Amino acid sequence: MNINIYQFNLLIIFVLLIASLGFAQSVDLPLGHWVYSFLDELETKGMFRCFSSRSLPMSRVEIAKIISQVEEAIKTDKIQITRTERDRLEQLKGEFHEELQNLNLESDPRYRERHLFTWSEENNQIHADFDFGFNLEVNRGEQYSSTERLSHTTFGGILRANLKNNLWFHIFVRNTLSRGVDYSQQNLDPSRGIPIDFAGKNAYSDRAIAYFIYKLPWFQLKVGRDQAKWGPGYRGSLMLSAQNPLFDMIKLKTQFNRFQFISIHGHLNSSYGRKFLAIHRLEIKIAPWLYMAGSEAVVYGNRGIEFQYLNPIMPYHVAEHHLGDQDNNTIGFDVTLFPIKDFKSYFELFIDDYTLSKSIFDYYGNKFAFLLGGYWVEPFGLKNVDFRVEYTRVEPFVYTHEDSINVYQNYDQSVGHWLGPNADDWFFEANYNPNRDLRLTFSLEQVRKGEGDISQPWNESYGERKRFLSGVVEKRNIYGVKITDQILRDVFLSLKAFWIQTKNLERIAAKNSHDTQVNLELLLNY
């Protein structure tokens, strides 16, 4: 059974009408906000434990509840907090002072978030903010014929509202002017990325987050366009990644005691036709120091929405069999462990296809990827310092499919990890925060990429045996330094420099390159 667009619209209207009978929940905090890295640090120090740390974005109310837990942990004197962490926490309390008031937790008026415009009356409230960004990138090296200068200037606006305590909505619109980028023509083809338009020598791209959120007595409903990230990975995620572009979705979320369940049915952008993603995740708190989760996803298209995939609790593996075994069904598992004080370890496994009758590591049909990492806060007693190491391996043909519509891709980006098939990545990062506003980062990374990409599935000419990192392998060693300073409240200036050594550039034998990338970025949210 499938549903056409007209029926689907009626279904959405019906769901919204029912949802409006519930109680409101706040909007979500966009991915990329500085709050998430700070919360990761506080959770690793044992100041709180939360399901949503591995299923972003979080709602503003969830973050306010976390802040309340952190304050309680500090009062017990069991957790030591540095001056830098205290100052960052005070800014965090100011950022969410409205949500904290509902929890009877006060914040310092000096740190409270200010808005460009605020309207409030009885149970109605609207906030409007201005968003600005400027990014200048300078590239030079052997792969460039001359020094390359690229600039991106972004203007945008944010609208967040609560109407009558039963409707929340969030709109975040950005338009970016790019100069120095070599676009040969206007791009409206999803397989080549997000839409690009021209006015003279300038290129323009835009994006918009726009959704409604309702809170029913038993679950939260979100309808609109946004991003999502699942799993414990920092440099990337295997099942649902932050690098995946915005997509339209219906999202259901519920928590009960030691369990959290999330389901998303979304529309992906493809040049091959209508394309959909159905994905759900169950996370279990085994102990205060152990979280486990299982996820399942299916990509399908070139037909209407399947009711079996729209059903949030339906096992997709079973549904796919009953629908003709023609779609791209995947499963995943992840574990987050807090074995000792100030340390977190994590593991994620993604299985695209598998059979137990063949070799796990040699047979082409056993397509899997895994990620493991460790995060250490205050290593060797060093205050305001943290270390992270992470390794990711994606086997050949992962994310691919014999039918192009079912490739694990949105626009020209992977829904999963950015590495793509037949590749691995070693990543190390060290951070130092001498005070609230300044953050110093040093990183080392090695990326290896063999033949094949997400659009190239297995065919008979390859034979049944797969070989990891087969063909000519591109190897990149990347050394990075980043300095970020909050020069004013919610005004961030960052300088990044990367030194890159590449062997077999673009997987061409003996084509080597030594390059430098310098990036200057200014971000303002008011």
Image: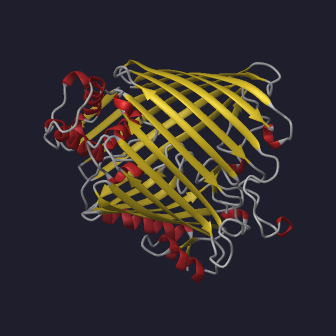
In the figure, 136 relative to 10: above or below?
A: above
The residue sitting at the front extreme is 380
Query: Which part of the image, by quadrant, shows the N terminus?
Result: bottom right
The spot of residue 181 in percent (x, y) is 72, 28
Q: Is residue 106 visible?
A: yes
Query: Which part of the image, by quadrant, shows the C terminus?
Result: top left
Front residue of 209 and 408? 408
Taking the spot 59% from the left edge, 27% from the top edge, the residue there is 480
Front residue of 263 and 454? 454
In the figure, 471 relative to 333: above or below?
A: above
Q: Is residue 259 left or right of residue 363?
A: left
In the figure, 352 relative to 122: above or below?
A: below
Q: Quadrant of residue 83?
A: top left
Taking the spot 81% from the left edge, 43% from the top edge, the residue there is 507
Q: Is residue 25 left or right of residue 479?
A: left
The spot of residue 77 in percent (x, y) is 16, 36
Taking the spot 53% from the left edge, 24% from the top edge, the residue there is 482
The spot of residue 14 in percent (x, y) is 38, 67
Q: Is residue 231 visible?
A: no
**What is the image's colouring?**
secondary structure
Front residue of 45 and 324? 45
Q: Quadrant of residue 362?
A: bottom right
The spot of residue 19 in percent (x, y) is 32, 62
